[in-house]
Amino acid sequence: MSNMFCYQCEQAARNEGCTSIGVCGKQPDTSAMQDLVVHAVKGVSQYAHRARQLGARDPEVDQAMIEGLFTTVTNVNFDTDRVEQVARRLGSAKKRARELYEEAAARAGQTPEQLSGPAQWEPAADSEGLKRQAEEIGIEKRISANGEDVTGLQELIIYGLKGSAAYADHARILGYDNEENLAFFHETLSYLADNPQDAEQLTSTALRCGELNLKVMAQLSQAHTDTYDHPQPTPVRITPVKGKAILVSGHDLRDLELLLQQTEGTGINIYTHSEMLPAHGYPKLNKYPHLAGNYGGAWQDQRREFDAFPGAILMTTNCIQEPKESYRDRIFTTGLVAWPGVQHIGEDKDFTPLIEKALAQPGFSEDGEEKKILTGFGHDAVLGVADKVIDGVKNGAIRHFFLIGGCDGAKSGRNYYTEFAEKVPEDCVILTLACGKYRFNKMDFGDIGGIPRLLDVGQCNDAYSAIQIASALAGAFECEVNDLPLSMVLSWYEQKAVAILLTLLHLGIRNIKLGPSLPAFVTPAVLNVLVENFNIAPISTVEEDMKQILG
């Protein structure tokens, strides 16, 4: 295949869409196979939704649906063969879901519906056949049939579901599932399978996806805190410690925990990278003395940082880039993340090859000068000092709160967030989360009355914590969140950011500044709806935005 069309991430070429190869490195064959996976997931859910309405469900069907969606998130799986395996697994899951539905209908004395669209899809016998199938259901085909506005709204929903699926998968790995959430996934995917056209209904469904994501983030927050305890403010070393080393990137705390257990007594130090930084705030992870610190910054700098890292590297979820040859033999993937030719750790989570590779590397030859940053300001920690925060607002010591964060990326214009943080007045507090924090989290912002001016709330999914903090403050001041001295200046990159944005819109949050550019799938007509209802706006200049916010 020589052509493709993908506009699901912020890096989409010319903000219109990648048409020959993804800016992320995704090949046309992989892109097509991912489109087919999304099509297949819809077919699974057409049957699974109806089976659920009759009281029939299968956890393996649910898992195939969640993992299928997560597989197609930006920077997760670049291995066409692996994505094809996911598509074929979904073919089997659809067959099982159909059986469930037909058996449940028979028990209820009903005649099963004859479903069309994705429900009729059957995987072709070979790879070339699958690619031909993918060409028939791609985004461009739907734009041609439905128009840009309707297709963009459909994609907004699917991207929100993809982001939520990522969080749901993290929670599932820790043993947390929610029947109501799973039912909504299937219901909404089945709705999309019918190729809905009504823009008002599509917009309403997108906001319902935001509601779903809030519930999924709450579920994941509970999974994390039940398993690893509530995050606590924790200083994290950002300079190396002498010795052998493994670097862990991605988002999956369970993978980090298993690796910490398997490396006890080996003399290997474990470092977090990018979105794994907040792991240090969890007491049951931070108890491991060989969790030595955080190395590097956000995901888009990994090719330079991994090249310089003198040990082995583990990617646990999305955010992988094409490995350079200099470290291709010492980077490993696990879970759903994959890159062709990179060694993959399977479901048994036996990290022996990774550990052996780390022991064969030189490691850090000496200690670096000790420097630390703070993380671990989840809602439990912040609300523990809520009285001081509230007093600070009432006595005028704290004038305003800024939530500055989100996904980082390589596209130009993101220096805006560094400059914005630098120019936040000294009587204001900055909340931050996700890897966007690396634009400014190593700066010294000082404190206000003992409260650090920079509070690292956690990973992107910890937007739930930020929402809890905002809700608690609104309750304390007996006002709505929109009436708080709180402004959100967000950066987006991929589908988890889309899910979080939909959550904020579902909650009625207004006046969000979003950048560095708006999603290509949000057409002018769709943007107009968001502006009219939520006053969402693209970032402009730091000076103009700061003046508008603070008056």
Image (cartoon, grey):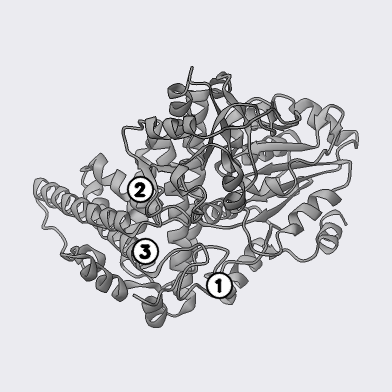
Element type at mark 2: helix
Q: Please report contact status of discs 1 and 2: CB closer than 8 Å, yes or no.
A: no
Residue 464 placement, left or right of 100: right
User: The residue under label 1 is which amino acid type?
Assistant: Ala
Q: Amino acid at mark 2?
A: Ile
Residue at the spot x=46%, y=59% of the render? 159
Say which amino acid is labelled 3: Thr
* Residue placed under numbered mark 3 in the picture: 30
Q: Nearer the viewer, residue 84 or 225?
A: 84
- Left or right, 59 with respect to 537, comes to left
Q: Earlier in the sequence, mark 3 or mark 2?
A: 3
Asked if residue 205 can be seen in this view, the reply is no
Q: Nearer the viewer, residue 475 or 464?
A: 464
Residue 195 visible? The answer is yes
Camera-side residue: 185 or 159?
A: 159
Q: Which mark is residue 13?
A: 1
Q: From the image, which quarter does the C terminus lie in?
A: bottom right
Determine the residue positioned at 36% across, 43% down. Answer: 344
When the figure is inspected, residue 371 is found, relative to residue 309, above or below; the finding is: above
For residue 379, which quarter of the picture? top right
| Crowd band around label 3 with a 10 angstrom C-alpha radius: few (<14), some (14–19), many (20+) | many
Residue 219 place in picture, x, y as percent: 47, 36
Q: Give whichever of discs 3 and 1 has the lower sequence position.
A: 1
Q: CA distance from mark 3 to mark 1?
A: 17 Å
Vertical comparison of 264 with 429: above or below = above
Q: Whole-percent x and y of residue 503? A: 55, 50
Q: Residues within 10 Å of mark 2 (few under 14, many from 20)?
A: many
Quadrant for the N terminus, please. Answer: bottom left
Q: Earlier in the sequence, mark 1 or mark 2?
A: 1
In this figure, which residue is indicated by the disc labeled 2?
66
